[in-house]
Image (cartoon, helix red, strand yellow):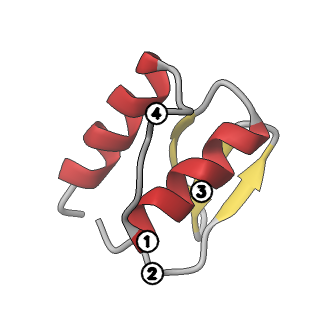
């Protein structure tokens, strides 16, 4: 996944352009996830489901 591309968050739903990537537990969790993946850092503040979603999105090659 190219984490540097423009992304949109609507509530907890994350989009890259018009492509839906997944639903985070909250808007702030989605924001934190993007920041973690763009800048490195710790994901300790994210729930396990949010960490799993980040991993699945990151593995996506499309």
Q: Position of residue 20 (x, y in %)?
A: 54, 48
Foreground label between 4 and 2? 4
Callout 1 crowding tier (Cα within 10 Å): few <14, some 14–19, many ≥20: few
Q: Is residue 57 left or right of residue 26?
A: left
Foreground label between 3 and 2? 2
Q: Which residue is mark 3?
A: 15
Which quadrant is the N terminus positioned in? Answer: bottom left
Write the residue at 75% across / 42% down. Answer: 28
- Nearest the viewer among 51 and 20 is 51
Counting residues from the start of the chain, the first of labels 3 and 4 encountered is 3
Write the residue at 33% across / 27% down. Answer: 52
Contact (CB < 8 A) between labels 3 and 2?
no
Q: Which residue is mark 1?
A: 38
Q: Secondary structure at mark 2?
A: loop
Q: Secondary structure at mark 4?
A: loop
Counting residues from the start of the chain, the first of labels 3 and 1 encountered is 3
Counting residues from the start of the chain, the first of labels 4 and 1 encountered is 1
Distance, label 3 to label 2, CA atoms, is 13 Å
**Taking 62 as reference, is 39 above or below it?**
below
Distance, label 2 to label 1, CA atoms, is 6 Å
Q: Secondary structure at mark 3?
A: strand
Counting residues from the start of the chain, the first of labels 2 and 1 encountered is 2
Residue 13 — which label? none
Q: Which residue is mark 4?
A: 44
Q: Which residue is mark 2?
A: 4
Which quadrant is the C terminus positioned in? Answer: bottom left
Q: Is residue 25 left or right of residue 47?
A: right
Write the residue at 46% across / 58% down. Answer: 36
């Amino acid at each position: 996944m190219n984490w540097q591309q423009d992304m949109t968050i609507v509530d907890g739903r994350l989009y890259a352009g018009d492509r839906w990537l997944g639903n985070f537990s909250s808007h702030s969790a989605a924001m934190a996830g993007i920041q973690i993946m763009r800048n490195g850092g710790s994901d300790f503040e994210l729930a396990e489901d949010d960490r799993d979603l980040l991993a699945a999105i990151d593995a996506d090659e499309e």
